[in-house]
Amino acid sequence: MKIATYNVNGINSRLPVLLKWLKNAKPDIVCLQELKAPQEKFPIAEINQAGYQAIWHGQKQWNGIAILSRGFDMTEVQRSLPGNADDIQSRYLEVIIDQIVICCLYLPNGNPFPGPNFEYKMEWIKRLKKRTKQFIDMNLPAILIGDFNIIPTEKDVYKPERWKDDALFQPEVRQVYSQFLKNGWTDSIRTLFQDETIYTFWDYLYKAYDRNAGIRLDHILLSPYLKSSLLRGGIDKEVRGWEKSSDHAPVWIELDRT
């Protein structure tokens, strides 16, 4: 089973890029973030034509998430993170596919730091920790996948000193990520590429992609139940270089489901 995450940065404006990547990469399950499209504007006809079914939660401007599946039935569990009924931002979608709990998430950015955006980010993380602890306690096969808006370590950023005042790199959020790992979650991509310089995002400014001046924001965390199932994975960095592409690249893993 090939599972991928991709922050598309506007699904309709970058639909040709997404469809080209789907055709080339052939993932079985794809978690998308930053649709930037209301519910009724999701391009379901084109997604179906590409061979995928979809569950999505749109939002008009900045957020929106979706899960695509090819050949696997999906059961929606919930489309918001429990714990705050007033939170209407489309950032969390939880489904069950092939008896795996898949949590597609688009964690808040938190900038400008400090301020209310960062407070919202930390509140959101607190709710995520509470929800995902249930998966660990019940020893469920579960995957946390998406754009975490967290740079885990200095190894995951080009020139880390430039990010010391950014919400993505604050000690509080890095500590949270580290705590996930201590609680049993496996950072699948870092596990596969322990000593390599790997990024998933390159800004549009200053020729960041050409210089490989990137950061690693997009993660796939596996619960202990799935750790031994990890076969391989990667970052489709070349997609970032395609014309009119997102500033993120697709990230993927393969799991042994035999």
Image (tube, rainbow, N blue to C red):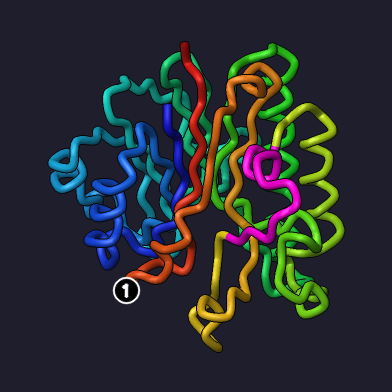
Q: Position of residue 245 (x, y in %)?
A: 36, 68
- Give the SS element for disc 1: loop
Q: Is 10 situated left or right of 204 in this image? A: left
What's drawn in magenta, residue-wise?
187-199
Q: Residue at x 45, y 55 (%)?
A: 236
| Residue that protrudes farthest toward the bottom in the picture | 206
Q: What residue type is labelled 1?
A: Lys
Q: Where is residue 174 in the image (x, y as percent from the top left)?
A: 80, 54
**Front in this rendered view, residue 208 or 12:** 208
Q: Is 160 situated left or right of 58 in this image? A: right
Q: For mark 1, does the 10 Å Cα neighbourhood hold few (<14), some (14 to 19), or many (20 or more) residues?
A: few
Q: Which residue is drawn at 80% across and 76% down?
A: 165
**Front in this rendered view, residue 13 or 93:** 13
For residue 191, which quarter of the picture? top right
Vertical relation: 85 (above or below) 172: above
Residue 104 magenta-highlighted: no
Number of numbered markers: 1
Q: Is 238 situated left or right of 91 in this image? A: left
**Front in this rendered view, residue 222 or 149:** 222
Q: Residue at x 77, y 80 (%)?
A: 162
Q: Which residue is drawn at 84% across and 33% down?
A: 182
Residue 196 magenta-highlighted: yes
**Front in this rendered view, residue 86 or 49:** 49
Q: Mark 1 points at which residue?
A: 244
Q: Where is residue 99 in the image (x, y as percent from the top left)?
A: 47, 14
Tell me the quadrant of the picture where the N terminus can be found: top left
Q: Is 246 situated left or right of 142 in this image? A: left
Vertical relation: 49 (above or below) 12: above
Q: Position of residue 42 (x, y in %)?
A: 25, 50
